[in-house]
Amino acid sequence: MTFSVKVSLPDAEVPFFTATVTDSVIPGVPLPSFLLNRYSRIVQPPILASNPPDIEIASDDDWISTSFIYSGRWSAAYIRPSEGGDELYGDGLHYPRIKPFWIGAKFSGSIHFPDGVKISSKVD
């Protein structure tokens, strides 16, 4: 199976990231969560108080940590640019101009991000 990924800003005419992902013929395998637990922690630094008032934030002075929980299958997949034959991905402004490795992992399933845990506070 091959599918295209295009990501753009709401008012943009051109996507800032495009790619085509092709599944490998190697079948996907379920991996138990405990194999990747040590790599699944995400830490969010304090968010600056200068954010617009309509953006809801969890904290403006605490570091928050969470470990995601996933259920699904991992498989090999191949990535290539979608359009124009350019071997770089991204527009260099909203997404960096990168050249990823030609093969990677594809995850199919669900990922749950539980509430974060405060790990430190701003010192006054």
Image (cartoon, grey):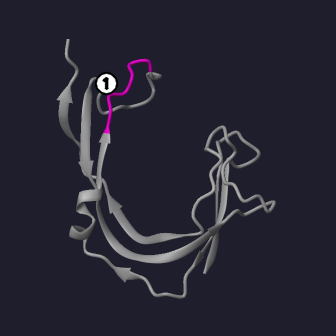
The prevailing secondary structure element of the residues shown in magenta is: loop
Which quarter of the figure has residue 81? bottom right
Q: Quadrant of the N terminus?
A: bottom right
**Is residue 2 rendered to the left or right of residue 47?**
right
- Under tag 1, what secondary structure? loop
Provide the residue span drawn in magenta: 44-50
Residue at far top of view: 124
Quick one: label 1, few (<14), some, or many (20+) residues within 10 Å? some
Q: In the rendering, at what x and y percent does residue 86 appear?
A: 77, 58
State the residue at coordinates (26%, 32%): 63
State the residue at coordinates (76%, 45%): 13
10, above or below 105, in the image: above
Which quarter of the figure has residue 80? bottom right
Residue at far right of view: 84
**Is residue 12 rendered to the left or right of residue 117?**
right
Q: In the rendering, at what x and y percent does residue 120 appear?
A: 18, 30
Kind of residue indicated by mark 1? Asp
Q: In the rendering, at what x and y percent does residue 32 appear?
A: 25, 74
26, above or below 94, in the image: below
Q: Which residue is mark 1?
A: 60
